[in-house]
């Protein structure tokens, strides 16, 4: 196979092939593919690599601009750099500042800022090392953006483990309310409720930078529970009318958890929102979400039009409010998440130690597991996972992710 690939490379790199028009080159490419000896994907890849030769003619600053604006990421960047000695030199080239200082591998520093915005380059280095023993930006980029594909898996494992422990033993040994596994990013980061992780619960509105008030922040961070109440009332109302639309809608809501689904259903079925909200105000003590969560929301409810607008544009409104929140600094966010995770794990561990049955081998295993998590947290083994959580937050602020996206 490698011999056939080398032959194709020789064809594509030959002067005769390069002198052909794009149309003529494509005919040759199709002929090679039609032989079936090499997959179409491999042939197209080799042809695409050959077509990067025009980049070698670009000035260095325009090459940087092309890579950053093109959206190339991860392995595609590395493959581009490896496609020729000229481009590899561009990729590894440093930038000399006015004072004579050279910023090594400038492109990869820019890529780290683009793909991991707001996170200082030094925080990617092993154990915070700087100087001659630290990794170069290119190696760091490969490690952070390409090799660290297990950050999401480690986070999922940790959250599943903690949620399972909290619910399995909450009734007998753990005084804290069981924490749900976060189905959506909102549950993981922002939803202020004892059954949610709310890892960024310390975020506060910077009133000097926004028209939003503290009540606005409280409303949006607990708006999900108002949505639950609306869904409950819609289902009750439609069920009493002997229809199944409400039940169907309940299943859809349980699947998507998207507030815009609610307003779409209300508008499509001509449901009286005033009636729904009046029923919620009358019955808030008995509906599923509970008096303690819904009462403060009812106290600051805007007019119905505002509710509709928020529901229609839930992710955008949420993002606007989050962009008015502080802190934004990476180190402050890192400390906030670290302390919240540590408090959750240490709380469970203390409860099991104080309330557990010494003869229960299963509890011993769980306790050992929690102690191992505490050790790994304090030893920095979860720093990359915390970095991944912060990146999710930054991506939400930039509009790359939505709070209603699944974890």
Image (cartoon, rainbow, N blue to C red):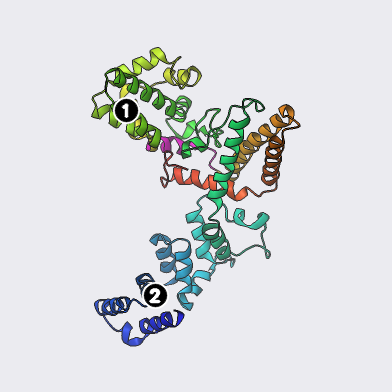
Instruction: Assign a secondary structure to mark 1.
Output: helix
Position of 385 relative to 79 (above/below): above
Left or right? Give the position of 35 relative to 90. left
Residue 71 is inside the magenta segment: no
Position of 121 relative to 232 (above/below): below
The answer to whether marks 1 and 2 mark residues whose Cβ atoms lie closer than 8 Å is no
Residue visible at 27% across and 18% down?
241
Residue visible at 46% across and 27% down?
222
Residue visible at 53% across and 42% down?
328
Position of 383 relative to 111 (above/below): above
Image quarter where the N terminus lies is bottom left
Which is nearer the N-term, disc 1 or disc 2?
2
The answer to which quarter of the image holds residue 357 is top right
Tell me the distance, in whole angstroms, between the alpha carbons under discs 1 and 2.
Answer: 52 Å
Instruction: Assign a secondary structure to mark 2.
Output: helix
The answer to which quarter of the image holds residue 99 is bottom right
What segment carries the magenta color?
316-328
Residue 178, percent across and down? 58, 29
Residue 124, percent across and down? 60, 55
Judged by depth in the image, the label closer to the viewer, 1 or 2, is: 2
* Extreme-top residue of the structure: 282
Q: Say which residue label 2 marks.
A: 46
- Residue 308 numbered tag: 1
Please name whichever residue, 256 or 304, is drawn nearer the observer in this view of the structure. 256
Residue 374, percent across and down? 69, 41
Please name whichever residue, 317 or 162, is drawn nearer the observer in this view of the structure. 162
Residue 324 is inside the magenta segment: yes
Q: Is residue 257 visible?
A: no
């Amino acid at each position: 196979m490698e011999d056939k690939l080398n032959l194709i490379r020789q064809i594509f790199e030959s002067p005769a092939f390069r002198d052909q028009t794009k149309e003529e080159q494509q005919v040759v490419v199709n002929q090679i593919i039609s032989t079936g000896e090499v997959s179409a994907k491999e042939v197209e890849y080799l042809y695409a690599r050959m077509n990067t030769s025009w980049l070698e003619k670009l000035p260095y600053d325009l090459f940087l601009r092309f890579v950053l604006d093109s959206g190339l990421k991860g392995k595609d960047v590395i493959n581009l750099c490896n496609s020729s000695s000229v481009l590899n030199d561009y990729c590894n080239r440093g930038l000399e500042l006015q004072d004579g200082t050279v910023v090594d591998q400038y492109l990869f520093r820019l890529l780290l800022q683009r793909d991991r915005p707001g996170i200082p380059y030094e925080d990617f280095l092993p154990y915070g090392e700087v100087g001659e023993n630290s990794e170069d930006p290119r190696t760091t980029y490969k490690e952070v953006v390409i090799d660290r594909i297990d950050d999401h898996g480690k986070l999922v494992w940790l959250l599943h483990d903690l949620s399972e422990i909290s619910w399995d033993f909450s009734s007998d040994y753990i005084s804290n309310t069981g924490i749900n596994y976060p189905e959506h990013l909102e549950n993981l980061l922002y939803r202020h409720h004892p059954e949610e992780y709310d890892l960024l619960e310390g975020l506060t509105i910077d009133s000097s930078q926004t028209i939003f008030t503290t009540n606005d922040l409280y409303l949006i961070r607990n708006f999900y529970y108002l949505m639950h109440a609306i869904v409950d009332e819609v289902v009750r109302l439609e069920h009493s009318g002997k229809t199944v639309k409400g039940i169907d809608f309940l299943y859809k809501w349980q699947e998507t958890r998207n507030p815009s689904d609610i307003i779409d259903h209300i508008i499509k079925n001509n449901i009286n929102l005033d009636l729904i909200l009046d029923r919620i105000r009358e019955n808030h003590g008995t509906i599923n979400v509970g008096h303690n969560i819904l009462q403060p929301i009812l106290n600051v409810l805007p007019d119905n039009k505002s509710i509709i607008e928020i529901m229609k544009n839930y992710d955008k409104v949420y993002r606007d409010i989050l962009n008015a929140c502080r802190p934004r600094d990476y180190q402050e966010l890192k400390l906030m998440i670290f302390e919240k995770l540590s408090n959750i794990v240490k709380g469970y561990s203390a409860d099991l130690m104080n309330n557990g049955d010494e003869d229960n081998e299963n509890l011993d295993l769980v306790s050992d597991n929690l102690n191992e998590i505490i050790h790994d947290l304090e030893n920095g083994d979860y720093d990359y996972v915390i970095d991944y959580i912060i990146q999710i937050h930054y991506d939400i602020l930039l509009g790359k992710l939505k709070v209603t996206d699944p974890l």
